[in-house]
Amino acid sequence: MEVKPKETKLISPFFVFFLLPGMQIGVGVLGFERIIAKEAGQDAWISVLISGLIVNVLLWMCFKLLGRGPQTLDLVAIHKDLFGQWVGNTFNIFFILYFIMISIILIRTYLEVIQVWMFPGVNVLMLLTIILILVYSFVVGGFRAVTGFCIIGLIIGSPLLLLNYFPLKHAHFENLSPLLDHSFLEIMKPVRE
């Protein structure tokens, strides 16, 4: 018997197009150029291409695992199916701890952006409470609500890309040479970032 997910957990393939960039683009878009150029310099564009290829390979692997059958609907079931009860549950615990750490880092980064750029004198606990209430309401609303939030965030954040035009008017593209002036390790460090 095939298990059918709830209606609030289903989205159309069109919305997946917005969901993937919505997950990848966040607070990091405010300073990723500085982070990758710090290690790789003018060869940072190579790091961006390599990280894009790695993300595509990982997505391909995820789709292959999800296509194994109806019994593997989520990450918990995939771990138990592939690695057994004990090792699968150990992986699940590591993923839970990893996602908790990432959530704390992201929330703290959002708080810093709001504190530094908009409201320097705001009470951090009050701001944290407001953000957590908003996050809770979106998560309780189901996967569709989270997807809608990603679409809205992507549409609102897209004009930030237009701000890259102004520095490009004064760019000297000959500064990109010499190509491959950095070592392989210096190019690979920003891939992780």
Image (cartoon, grey):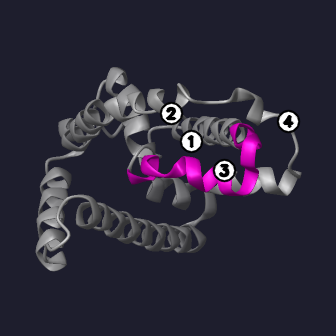
Amino acid residing under circle 3? Ala
The residue pinned by badge 3 equals: 37
The residue pinned by badge 2 equals: 167
> Which residue corresponds to the image point at 70% horizontal and 28% vertical from the top-left?
173
Q: Which label belongs to residue 179?
A: 4
- Secondary structure of residue under mark 4: loop
- The answer to whether 45 appears left or right of 89 in the picture is right
Contact (Cβ within 8 Å) of mark 4 with mark 3: no
Amino acid residing under circle 4? Leu
- Real-space CA distance between mark 1 and mark 4, rounded to the nearest whole angstrom: 34 Å
Q: Could you classify mark 1 by the number of other residues whose Cα lies within 10 Å: few (under 14), some (14-19), or many (20 or more)?
A: few
Relative to 174, does residue 54 appear above or below in the rendering? below
Tell me which corner region of the image, top left, top right, bottom left or bottom right, holds residue 81: bottom right
- Real-space CA distance between mark 3 and mark 2, rounded to the nearest whole angstrom: 16 Å
Q: Nearer the viewer, mark 1 or mark 2?
A: 2
Count up the numbered dots. 4
> Which residue corresponds to the image point at 72% horizontal and 57% vertical from the top-left?
39
